[in-house]
Amino acid sequence: MFLAWRELTFARGRFALMGSVVALIGVLMVLLSGLSVGLVNDGVSGLKRMPVDAFAFEEDVDHSAAFARSAVDVTAVDEWATVDGVKDAAPFGNVLVNTRTDSGVDLDLALFGVQPGTWIAPSSATGEDLAGPGEVVLAGDVRDMGVDVGDVVVIDQIGTELTVVGFLDGQHTFGHVDIGYVDLSTWQEVHGGVRPGEEAPAWVYEQVTAVALRGDGIDLAAGDAAIDTTSMTLDESFGASPGYTAETATLQLIQVFLYAISALVVGAFFLVVTIQRKHELAVLRAMGASSRFLLRDSLTQSAILLVTSTAIGVGIGLLLGSGLSATEMPFALEAAPVAGAAVLLVVLGMIGAAVAVTRITRVDPLTALGGNR
């Protein structure tokens, strides 16, 4: 410990350079973590906030696009209500639309169709709850775009008008698009392309996107076998959101490479330091210092450098991240991912340093005495 601290204070410039690199990696990890969480929230925050445990989609539907391609007969709702473990079952519809308000604001919306007053219908934080056809409850973020209660939202192509009656609390997005909750019959008409004043064919009211399920220990396999559906838990259904799987896989791959690079960089630094200290260490070995003592001293030096540099880097990253959170960029800082990234950086750095300093155990005391000449 004495030797480690003495060298840290004596060779301040060298270790400051190493610490700066580790701190920069820490900053990058925090920013990447915030971007990853922000993209996930922007993609599925609306699903996360729903009181749903699972969805039952059309049989053999593409799992990566189930919300867009699934069409389930509405009679499946009553059948799923009798499955073991199901407490509540409700019809659920989803469709992406382009809209414009009567005040000229363009809105891309994910329309979620639900039956008003049921367990799956949301409660408005501002205004009134959804009560019937022709109404829409929007995500709270939409208010920042100048939309208010009483405005009329017109759906492009078919001209259906929806009156804004309330706003939800905070972010409710699906596939990076704000959510609007509408009455199920309104959703079915929009999904079927029925224009105002037209008579809707009977099939329009017979289909929904999925059956929303709530309950403990739902036997999804038995339900699928009996009702001919493909069910997914709520977490599994995130992969059916547009772009979710590709985005998360890309960011996870970047994080894996970043962690690997951090271990290699730290390991390379300590390998160079160990080589530079070769003669000094040989002298210590010749004076009777054990390999265990030298290893412990070097690893302590690595731990001090890594923990201090990581703390500085995470602190800078949090400051930068707080500024990015106030922008339109999908960025969100959460304690658990940031703490996990910091711990992983220290652990991988220690592993890289440990691999490098094992060279110490092979230092020959005769080197200090000129025995290799």
Image (spheres, grey):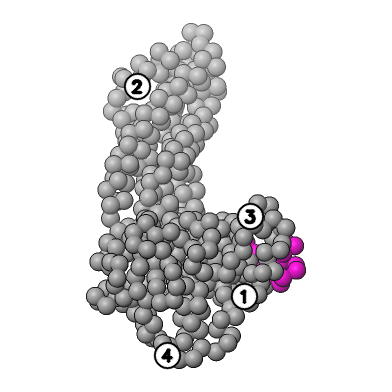
Q: Secondary structure at mark 1?
A: loop
Spatial separation of the CA atoms under disc 2 and disc 4:
80 Å
Q: Amino acid at mark 3?
A: Gly
Spatial separation of the CA atoms under disc 1 and disc 4:
24 Å
Name the residue that disc number 3 marks.
215
Name the residue that disc number 4 marks.
197
Tell me where the magenta segment starts and ends, as one range.
Answer: 221-233
**Image height check: is 292 above or below 235?**
above
Q: Amino acid at mark 1?
A: Val
Q: Amino acid at mark 4?
A: Gly
Q: Amino acid at mark 2?
A: Leu
Query: Are there few (<14), some (14-19), or many (20+) residues within 10 Å of tag 1?
Result: some
Query: Does the magenta-highlighted stretch encompass residue 227?
Result: yes
**Image height check: is 3 above or below 12?**
above
What number is the disc on residue 8? Answer: 2
Check contact, mark 2 vs mark 1: CB within 8 A. Answer: no
Query: Does the magenta-highlighted stretch encompass residue 339?
Result: no
